[in-house]
Each structure stands twice: as C-alpha cells, then as structure tokens.
Image (cartoon, grey):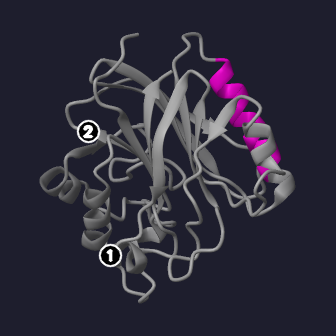
Amino acid sequence: MTRTSRPIKVASYNMRKAIGTDRRRNPERTLEVLREIDADVIALQECDRRFGQRAGVIPLHLLDEHSPWKAVPFGVRAQSMGWHGNALLVRKDASVGDRDMIHLPTLEPRGAVMADVSVRGVTLRAVGMHLDLSGLWRRRQAHAILSHVAACPTPHPSVLMGDLNEWSRQAGCLRDFQRDYISADTGPSFHARRPVARLDRILASRDLRITDCGVHSSLAARTASDHLPIWATLEIA
C-alpha cells in the first residue's frame, strides 16, 4: 500500500432522519452540512425512514445531482441508502470492493455496514454503526463488529465510525474498541445546541495515523440534527 500525498478525510453523522432542532425535516439542509465537511468517506446514522419501504431520507436523485458522493449499495431496498439506518457515502470516483452487512445482537433491529473503499490509491475498510442504548448490548455489539472485521480474509487499514451511545470516556464498549483501535479526540457532539457528550466516535486501526480531527459546528450543523457531525483526517502509519 502506498502513501497518499493528501490525507483521507472521514466523517460520521447521526442525521436524525434530517429532522433538525427546529423540528423541521430538511434533507437539503443535511446535504448542505455534508458539503461543508467535504469528507471522502462518510458514515451516516438514522438516514432511512423507519417504516414502510425505509426509503432514504435524502432522496437518491438529490444525492446524485447535488453532491460529490454516492451511497455504497447493500442490495436491501431500492430506495434505501443503507441498512438499519446506517449508510456509507463515498466519493463518486472512489471504487468500492467487498461490502457486507453486520448483524448485531440486540432486542431491537440494529446492524452495522462495512465496505472496502479505494480512495486515491489507498484502500480503507470503513464500518458505520449505531449502537444500543443499553451498555450490556453495546458491549455485545462491539464484540460482534470487532470479530467480523477481524475475520475478513484480506486485511486493510480500518476505520469504525458512528453513534456509540456511550457516555463514558473510557469504559464500556470504548474499552473494547480501544484494545485494537485509536479513538480520535474529536470532542463532544451531543446535544447540538449545547454539546456535552462524546456519543459519536471515529476509531482508527493502529496502521493508520490520525493527523487531525474535530466536531463540525457550523450554523447549519447546529440546526440540522440533535447531533453534530465529527470528522478526522487519516494517513497510513
């Protein structure tokens, strides 16, 4: 694997079905926030409607016509952006290799998505997730994700991103993830109006170096969801 002259930027965003702190659903505003971040790979949570056909809240034609990204297809529903509300967006010129849905142990429907994405000559294994409210189930889900990634026959530098629902700074599922992954020190992302909790996380495998990271707190981001998006730039270590 060769070094890239420019770091790869990744981001994670619980978009809350595009319902903002003003209680208005506005997919165009969500897309505006994503364009502000301008990441190469984006993990979205709560991106699909919960019932019916579970269509993507951001219409696919809007994504195609007004953004530089495409949704990684997981072959579940034609109008869905992902699976169980989790989606991965990648640059339109990126190539997508193996991809998979990760079934998570839970009392309610939850899952994670994974894809091998090649950006500017670097292949990155990206996982998007939204973990349970229960600490016990979060730890079980973390083990399921870590086991699934470890079992992939071809190793790649990996980044795990999403809403972990973990209020602790070091304990719980974070302790499990941080045995093999480095957590980006992005800062608190919840609640968007007054962020105090680091519920959203980006975790990079130890063959990656986090060169920069943060929380995106523009005016649009502070009103588009109850979570602020987080981001990190990565290089091969």
* Mark identifier at residue 220: 1
Q: Quadrant of the N terminus?
A: top left
Left-right relation of 234 to 179: left
Q: Residue 17 occupies which quadrant of the picture?
A: bottom left
x and y percentages locating residue 154 in the rendered image: 54, 10
Residue on which the image places disc 2: 91
Decide which of tag 2 and tag 1 comes sooner along the chain: 2
Q: Secondary structure at mark 1?
A: helix
Mark 2 surroundings within 10 Å by alpha-carbon count, few (fewer than 14), some (14 through 19), many (20 or more): many
Measured Cα–Cα span from mark 2 to mark 1: 22 Å
Q: Nearer the viewer, mark 2 or mark 1?
A: 1
x and y percentages locating residue 50 in the rendered image: 51, 66
233 or 114: nearer the viewer: 233
Tell me the amino acid under the disc marked 1.
Ala
Q: Residue 212 occupies which quadrant of the picture?
A: top left
x and y percentages locating residue 29 in the rendered image: 28, 73
31 or 11: nearer the viewer: 11
Q: Is residue 107 magenta?
A: no
Considering only vertical position in the picture, is 152 above or below 211?
above
Residue 182 in sight: yes
Query: Most extreme residue toward the front, as rendered?
Result: 211
Q: Residue 9 occupies which quadrant of the picture?
A: top left
Residue 59 in sight: no
Left-right relation of 6 to 234: left
Q: Circles 2 and 1: CB distance less than 8 Å? A: no
Left-right relation of 68 to 85: left
Which residues make up the magenta segment? 138-151
Query: Most extreme residue toward the left, as rendered?
Result: 65
